[in-house]
Amino acid sequence: MRLIGQIHVSLKGSLIQRDPTLWEKLKRGFGARVDLDTDRMRVELEATAVIDQVRRALVQLGIGNALSLVIDDTVIFQDTDGKPDDLPDLVLALSEHSAVFGRGFSELKFAAEHEEAGLHLVIETRARTEHAEDEPAGIVSVGGRVRDLEPRAGESAEDYRRRVEPLAKDPALFETARMQFESFVGRLEGALKASIPEARVEQRHAEARVVHAPQGDGAAAGGQPANPTHPAYDPFVAYYPPSPLGMMLDVMLISSFMHMMSPPHVLFVSPAGTPLGTAQEAAADPGLLNNAERGGDDDPGAGDEGDGPEGGEPWGDDGGGIDDGGGIDGDFGD
């Protein structure tokens, strides 16, 4: 089961103007007014300030375990040894690069992880100084897993099935995890509002999902969209490559939920992130998932996976593995 949340951070910026054409230059020479505004915005951000603001929000929630910091494709910090409570090390690493990135950047990615109430959470923050007018300057994505449902080191597929199968039949476990996750995302939203008062901070969604892949479709265990605004984007996958046992878990959960009298409030989605229905709807209509299988997995509202706010450029190429992570931490604006 995937726990996915998203928070948008919007700041006031200035419209970027394009270069005038020769004809427009001539028109301006005769006193005519020429509209050179584009649909893109520029926000003045400093990497050190951005990181400081996000760090304060995370510390307020007791989060001190940093994963990575990447600025303009330069790895500033990476927790390759799994050291706990290393957020101060990330700040120190950034201070050593302040001469390069202290006055500006194009894209900043900062990731941290946290455990509470049986949940394993990855919090990824991204920011851009230039973005489409209808996109936020920053996106905070939260991905979570129920720790008891994660495969353990050295655990065989059969041992995993025997251990997890009883848990998959307990609706209270999933309902509690969902409510705890929603509470965490709400508290994170509040902490960001307090640490970035000049920004508009809005929670877009916080929900529990189970991926239903048509028979023979391995997409559920494969890559994911690089664009963090895509509804199927899960930062947990960007820093922890999916286990082959994840598909086994999805199958067990779908089977269990379909036979429960009162299934938990979990959303079934396709590998592309298209909503297929809730667990309650699937239990009431067993043919719901079969109909979805025949209907395909296209997401009509999500757009191409690689489309980002940069006119078709993706926000980033996170596709798996903790070694390609990033996020942001600090002052989103003056």
Image (spheres, rainbow, N blue to C red):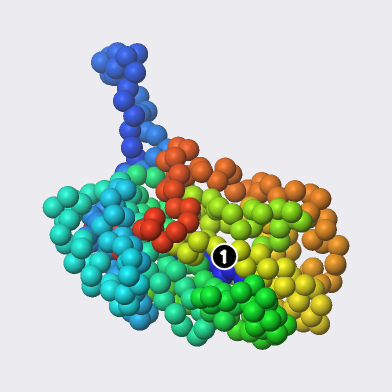
Q: Residue at x 53, y 57 (%)?
A: 233
- Residue bearing mark 1: 243
Residue 1 x %, y %: 62, 71
Residue 252 x %, y %: 72, 73
The reply to whether residue 243 is visible in this rendering is yes
User: Where's the C terminus, which quadrant?
Assistant: bottom left
Q: Is residue 198 left or right of residue 175?
A: left
In the picture, residue 18 is in which quadrant?
top left
Q: Residue at x 44, y 69 (%)?
A: 122
Label total for image: 1
Q: Secondary structure at mark 1?
A: loop
Q: Amino acid at mark 1?
A: Ser
Q: Is residue 106 left or right of residue 187?
A: left
Residue 276 x %, y %: 73, 60
Q: Residue at x 41, y 76 (%)?
A: 114
Q: Is residue 119 left or right of residue 60?
A: right
The reply to whether residue 195 is visible in this rendering is no
Q: Residue at x 50, y 85 (%)?
A: 117
User: 280 or 85, which is in the foreground?
Assistant: 85
Q: Residues within 10 Å of mark 1 (few under 14, many from 20)?
A: few
User: 9 or 297, which is in the foreground?
Assistant: 297
In the image, residue 318 sits, relative to residue 162, either above or below, namely above
User: 198 or 254, which is in the foreground?
Assistant: 254
